[in-house]
Amino acid sequence: MSTSTTMEDYLLHPFKEILAELDIQERGDDSKWIRLTEIILGIDDLAASSSPTRMRAGSNRDSGSGTYAGSTFMQNLKYKVSVKSLSSSQPAKSPPAPQLKPSSGTTSPVAALDTLLGDGILAVDVKITAHSKEVQAVMNTKGIAWPVQYELVHAVTLGRWTWGDISSQKLDSLEGTAAVAAPKVHAVMTGRSEVPAEVTVSFNMSTSKDQTIWDAGAASVEGQGRRLGLMGDFRSSKNWFGGQIQQIVRLLPDGSMRLERPEMTRSNRFARFLSSRRMIKIKLPKTANFDADGSVRVALARKFVLCGRVFVPIDAKDGKGYLKETSEDYECGGRESEGDLRRMSFAQFIQLHNTLSRNSKQEPCLVSHADFAVLVKRSAISFEWAMYFALFVELVQEGVIFRTYSA
């Protein structure tokens, strides 16, 4: 695969819609701003002379230095792009605000497709997966960690206790970090310290490898793109990357839903981008006559509520459905401490991965399904894609390039 093809595959898609909106211009003799194509050429030049140009996360660490073999490449690339963008014979000045193209005041029929989904709050029916308005309000007030909430409602769906059993006094004992509180859920709720053999506590993971569940939430709050990987160690985890936990809901033949124990598995591209907790996998019944009349398919075209958070279907593959958490809340408010301000609405998600106006000559649903089926497939982190995107984020943060979209 050529370097330019690699750029197209790993940088321009699925973030091509963000990049296409960048307006990078020369702003006078004293400060030259490179265009996106010049960034790509800079990457091509350095990548062509770098070896290896592709490696997996956590491999090929420089001996003794504690840094990845690709870190020097990243530093050189970042330096080259910055120097090229700000080179001049005079001292560089602070860049002025980006110049936006004037609007004609009219919207073409094709461009109007981008507003088809409105503000992302979908006017469809709501399906309660597991939610109690009263209990959720108390959990939010006390700052109960997400893995603890999941374990509590997981047991509710299994009939081990009821919503009424989750009292404010018991929740007082479950405050604090997930690593400390989640393993105590069974003891606090039942008054028994021993865990029955048939009960598998969802988030009671003892090994250092399993502690990645605790790190996932912290990485989302951090907001540095760490979930994409190749940013080194994080907390107690070596070479950490996101998307390694799958939250699972099973749809039963009678139409009811039951939470299952989260699974540690290989991540996929959506899970790394959104984070594990922002996605749910629905397992569908495998009976021969399931959904013979199509009613279940209609029932799945809803918004699903789990602990006040709204999830919507984005794809179905191999007898499983995939839900994404949106920026919409149900009978509760978002929590800044949980990184909720960085959630994407359904409309923003579609615009990012399959802008309707730019696929107006195709069947949008078919295009989305084909793309999303690949992005929910289990995959390994590639060196180039994570490296290029990490560079893009850094350049935006440092003001070398401007971003018109903010998740």
Image (spheres, rainbow, N blue to C red):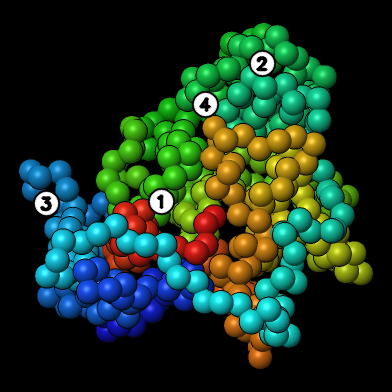
Q: Nearer the viewer, mark 1 or mark 2?
A: 1
Q: Front-most of 157 and 174?
A: 174
Location of residue 328 in the rendering, given as x and y in whole percent from the top left corner: 71, 48
| Cα–Cα span, label 4 and label 2 | 13 Å
Judging by the rendered image, the residue that carries numbered circle 2 is: 171
Q: Secondary structure at mark 4?
A: helix
Q: Position of residue 259 (x, y in %)?
A: 70, 40
Does the CB distance between marks 3 and 2 fall below 8 Å? Answer: no
Residue 26, relative to residue 276: is it above or below?
below
Residue 210 seen from this side? no
Tell me the CA gap for discs 1 and 3.
23 Å
Picture residue at 61% right of the left edge, 69% below the top: 351
> In which quadrant of the rendered view does residue 335 lie?
top right
Indicate the position of residue 273 as horizontal and vertical percent values.
Answer: 49, 56
Label 1: how many Cα within 10 Å (few below 14, some 14–19, many 20+): many
Q: Label 3 vs label 2: CA separation?
A: 46 Å
- Give the camera-side residue of 155 and 102: 102
Instruction: Examine the image and state in which quarter residue 103 appears.
Output: bottom right
Q: Which residue is mark 4?
A: 178
Residue 277 drawn above or below residue 208: below
Q: Which residue is mark 1?
A: 225
Q: Is residue 384 above or below residue 397?
A: below
- Amino acid type, callout 4: Ala
Confirm or deny contact between disc 4 and disc 2 (CB under 8 A): no
